[in-house]
């Protein structure tokens, strides 16, 4: 018999369930990357909506026109558009107007996030997420249609941003819940650190796509990302599997009796029984499918003789957790407030970094957008590094605290050296991206999943979506405030914006002090004060 090709041997070396887990990992990665892809265009287009003018004429170095676009004949300007940009953003108060656009989106996102988690727990994830992606694609494209229909009403753009912010809240609780259904706590920081790079990947792709058209036809900078989000919504509807039980996790346990295949049974692990000692079961997990997946990776050494199958309940005895009940989970409030300030810093960079680069390094909108992607490249490494360190040390809060402590002085150095040339800007973008995005990525993924499966919940899987929504919703309040404050402060100088960001980092660190002290004094505890669940 001929030897199997190397590629086929690689495929069959993994179990059916491992392939499903990999598929869900990649699919949810792409789904949420498309959400971020659609959020980035507004920051790229800002340099085109308002061009720096001198005496009523646009300065050539700030015109936002790329060299390749310089040969086009000038477009006939509508009555309410000037060489200073697109009305109404061509006036002196453009920074406040652009900041209001950011605030309208992010404020709607923050408010909607609190409701989204509660609604998401009660609806099928696949339908809920599909609706959100189709609606988000429509509203993102609607903003770009303002270019083609010469719409210059500020209210039109604000309302579009508000509606888009509301529907985008369907994304985060859905994908985090789905991923947590498929992956246990073992190596959660690393897995979710890698997975959370979708934020930076989406930002990078959004910057490149929006930058390609920003100087020639900025409407397409929104329409194309909107079409991509809508297309991914269709992919979500066709392929997303919410939970392992939907496709029966049976391959690993097929060697045992058929009773093991009951997807509503519960598995419990027993200690070896000694003479004179009563047998007491140790609950390994309330979720049999999760245990099956943990065993599928080949690192579980559970002996069949130690597994007892108990009949599952005919109905679901666990009800969705209340909002106040989720707030009582240890660590939720502290990490939520920490994320408020961490996300304030991250989203200020997300929405204002290209315009800052345009102002400081005198680049056009397209080149500034491309250069700003380096911040997201640094964010990819920062998120993965935070996950690896927190897994190794089993200290989520301490890992976040260390990166926040280093981020504040790094931002000060960035504000000073970015005026010295492109080389210094490139280096500081990478470093700042890693330190700013690391804590943000860790809290919104691994920490949220840890707290959503806290021991105080007694196995209630319905809590994860609400906990995730509370943490990210509180963070989104900071995300709304950051760009708004940047728009209000930047007229007095960009240095003041960086002072505001450093103060926010210090506040984020302050809210973690109690948890950091608890972790250092009790080395066996992780987020929320619970002992880590290790894979055997």
Image (cartoon, rainbow, N blue to C red):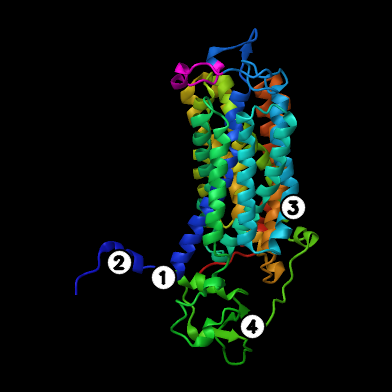
Q: Distance between the residues labelled 4 and 2?
A: 38 Å
Label 1 to label 2: alpha-carbon separation? 12 Å
Looking at the image, which residue sits at the far bottom? Answer: 275
Q: Which mark is residue 15?
A: 1
Up the image or down, 515 lies above or below 498; here it is: below
Please say whether residue 526 is visible from this viewpoint.
Answer: no
**Magenta region includes residue 336:** no
Secondary structure at badge 4 equals: loop
Looking at the image, which residue is at 71% across and 49% down? Answer: 473
Task: Check disc 4 and report the residue beneath it.
Answer: 312
Q: Is residue 519 visible?
A: yes
Callout 2 crowding tier (Cα within 10 Å): few <14, some 14–19, many ≥20: few
Identify the secondary structure beneath mark 2.
Answer: helix
Which residue bears the numbered disc 2? 9
Total numbered circles:
4
Local crowd size for mark 3, using a 10 Å CA cut-off: few (<14), some (14–19), many (≥20) = many
In space, the residues marked 3 and 1 are separated at their CA atoms by: 38 Å
Indicate yes or no whether the magenta region holds residue 71: yes
- With 363 as the anchor, is 141 left or right in this view? right
Which stretch did the figure color magenta?
Answer: 62-75
For marks 3 and 4 on the same chain, the one whose residue lies earlier in the sequence: 3
In the displayed orientation, state which residue is furthest to the left.
1
């Amino acid at each position: 018999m001929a030897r199997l090709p190397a590629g086929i041997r690689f495929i069959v070396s993994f179990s059916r369930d491992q392939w499903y887990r990999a598929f869900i990992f990649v699919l949810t990665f792409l789904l949420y990357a498309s959400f971020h892809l659609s959020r980035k265009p507004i920051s790229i287009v800002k340099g085109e909506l308002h061009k720096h003018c001198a005496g009523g004429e646009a300065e050539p170095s700030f015109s936002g026109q790329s060299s390749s676009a310089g040969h086009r004949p000038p477009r006939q300007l509508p009555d309410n558009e000037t060489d200073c940009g697109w009305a109404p953003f061509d006036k002196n108060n453009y920074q406040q107007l652009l900041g209001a656009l950011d605030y309208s989106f992010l404020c709607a996102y923050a408010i909607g996030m609190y409701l989204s988690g509660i609604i998401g727990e009660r609806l099928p994830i696949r339908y809920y997420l599909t609706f959100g992606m189709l609606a988000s694609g429509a509203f993102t494209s609607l903003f770009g249609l303002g270019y083609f229909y010469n719409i210059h009403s500020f209210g039109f753009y604000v309302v579009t941003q508000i509606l888009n912010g509301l529907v985008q809240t369907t994304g985060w609780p859905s994908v985090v819940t789905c991923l947590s259904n498929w992956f246990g706590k073992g190596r959660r920081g690393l897995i979710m650190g890698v997975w959370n790079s979708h934020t930076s990947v989406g930002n990078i792709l959004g910057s490149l796509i929006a930058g390609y058209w920003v100087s020639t036809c900025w409407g397409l900078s929104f329409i194309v990302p909107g079409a991509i989000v809508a297309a991914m919504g269709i992919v979500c509807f066709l392929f997303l599997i919410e939970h392992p039980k939907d496709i029966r996790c049976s391959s690993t346990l097929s060697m045992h009796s058929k009773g093991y295949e009951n997807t509503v049974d519960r598995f419990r692990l027993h200690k070896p029984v000694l003479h004179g000692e009563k047998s007491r079961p140790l609950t390994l997990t309330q979720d049999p499918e999760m245990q099956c997946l943990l065993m599928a990776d080949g690192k579980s050494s559970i002996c069949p003789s130690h597994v007892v199958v108990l009949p599952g309940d005919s109905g679901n005895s666990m009800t969705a957790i209340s909002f106040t009940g989720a707030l009582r989970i240890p660590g939720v409030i502290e990490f939520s407030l920490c994320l408020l300030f961490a996300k304030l810093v991250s989203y200020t960079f997300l929405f204002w970094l290209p315009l800052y680069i345009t102002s400081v390094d005198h680049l056009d909108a397209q080149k500034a957008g491309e250069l700003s992607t380096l911040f997201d490249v640094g964010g990819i490494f920062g998120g993965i590094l935070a996950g690896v360190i927190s897994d190794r040390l089993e200290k989520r809060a301490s890992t976040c605290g260390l990166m926040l402590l280093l981020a504040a002085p790094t931002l000060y150095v960035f504000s000073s050296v970015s005026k010295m040339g492109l080389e210094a800007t490139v280096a500081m973008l990478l470093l700042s991206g890693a330190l700013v995005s690391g804590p943000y990525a860790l809290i919104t993924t691994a920490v949220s999943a840890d707290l959503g499966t806290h021991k105080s919940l007694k196995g209630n899987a319905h809590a994860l979506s609400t906990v995730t929504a509370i943490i990210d919703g509180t963070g989104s309040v900071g995300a709304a405030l950051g760009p708004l404050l940047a728009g209000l402060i930047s007229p007095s100088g960009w240095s003041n914006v960086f002072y505001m960001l450093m103060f926010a980092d210090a506040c984020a660190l302050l809210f973690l002090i109690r948890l950091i002290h608890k972790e250092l004094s009790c080395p066996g505890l992780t987020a929320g004060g619970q002992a880590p669940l290790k894979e055997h």
